Image (spheres, rainbow, N blue to C red):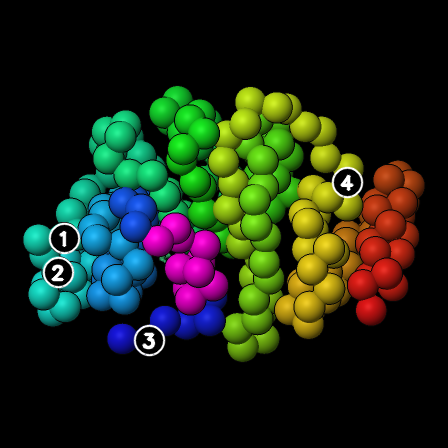
Amino acid sequence: MTLSPRLAAVAGLVRQGSRFCDVGTDHGCLPVWLVSQGICSGGIAADLRAGPLSRAAETVKRAGLSEKITLCLSDGLDQIPSGSAEDIIMAGMGGMTMLRIIERTAWLCDRSIRLILQPQSCQPELRRYLADAGFAVETERAVREGRHCYDLFSLSYTGRRQTLTPVEAVVGRLPQNRDEDSVCYVKMQLRRVKRQYDGLFRSGRDAAETKELLLALEHCLEEMT
Ligand SMILES: C[S@@+](CC[C@H](N)C(=O)[O-])C[C@H]1O[C@@H](n2cnc3c(N)ncnc32)[C@H](O)[C@@H]1O
């Protein structure tokens, strides 16, 4: 089995020897890959819906890993007991869904747990929430797949609350990386904020804050290239 560049990058943030829980597993490829590559000895593949979970069950069975990967029907981590996994993966889901799952799972506030997140949307809201709730980013990466560029990051709880700048909320720590995919991600966000600015400007609404963000992102990109 080979993983897409996005999922391979997610797998790259999982700690060797940890027990994982893949929330929103869908096809179950990531859990199977983690175990078959010897990165983890076992873990949990969870999904909200029975359809995706049965797809995951099929993938796990085909790989002969039914004894090592537990399948669990669960809304977020609601059915996952504390202590059953150390590396919590959420990939390919909306940022607000991730935020709500983290917000209601008290046992994530433990320094030994690593969150590995690859949100599809609402990244600024998710980043702001995590910083304010005392989670600190350990590693952040961007990865290009086809025409899209994704960002992903790992975090753990420190209890130290942080307030992010508007640029940090939008592009996280990627400006420090300076690699091609991080540049691609910052450019993508720059285009998104430009569209937002144009819309506000055309409709005569207050665009001052968005313009400030746009200029800060342009500066950030100049520094990266
Ligand atoms: C687009 S798929 C992503 C699959 C895989 N994680 C990946 O990155 O390729 C999103 C999956 O998240 C699941 N999902 C959505 N909301 C969820 C929730 N609250 N709890 C658990 N799973 C959820 C969906 O059922 C779906 O299978």
Query: Mark on residue 217?
Result: none
Residue 204, x across and y down, in percent: 90, 45
Mark 3 and mark 1: Cα distance apart in space: 19 Å
The residue carrying mark 3 is: 2
Q: Tell me the kind of residue under disc 2.
A: Leu
48 sits to left or right of 218: left
Please tell me which residue is depicted at 69% across the width and 68% down the height of the picture: 179
Describe the element under mark 1 as helix, strand or loop.
Answer: loop
Q: Magenta stretch containing residue 8, yes or no?
A: yes
Mark 1 and mark 4: Cα distance apart in space: 43 Å
| In this rendering, the label closer to the viewer, 1 or 4 | 1
Mark 2 neighbour density, 10 Å: few (under 14) some (14–19) many (20 or more): some
Mark 1 neighbour density, 10 Å: few (under 14) some (14–19) many (20 or more): some
Tell me which numbered mark, 2 or 4, is placed earlier along the sequence: 2
Q: Quadrant of the N terminus?
A: bottom left
Please tell me which residue is depicted at 82% across the width and 69% down the height of the picture: 225
Tell me which numbered mark, 2 or 3, is placed earlier along the sequence: 3
The residue carrying mark 1 is: 68
Mark 4 neighbour density, 10 Å: few (under 14) some (14–19) many (20 or more): some
Q: Nearer the viewer, residue 102 or 197?
A: 102
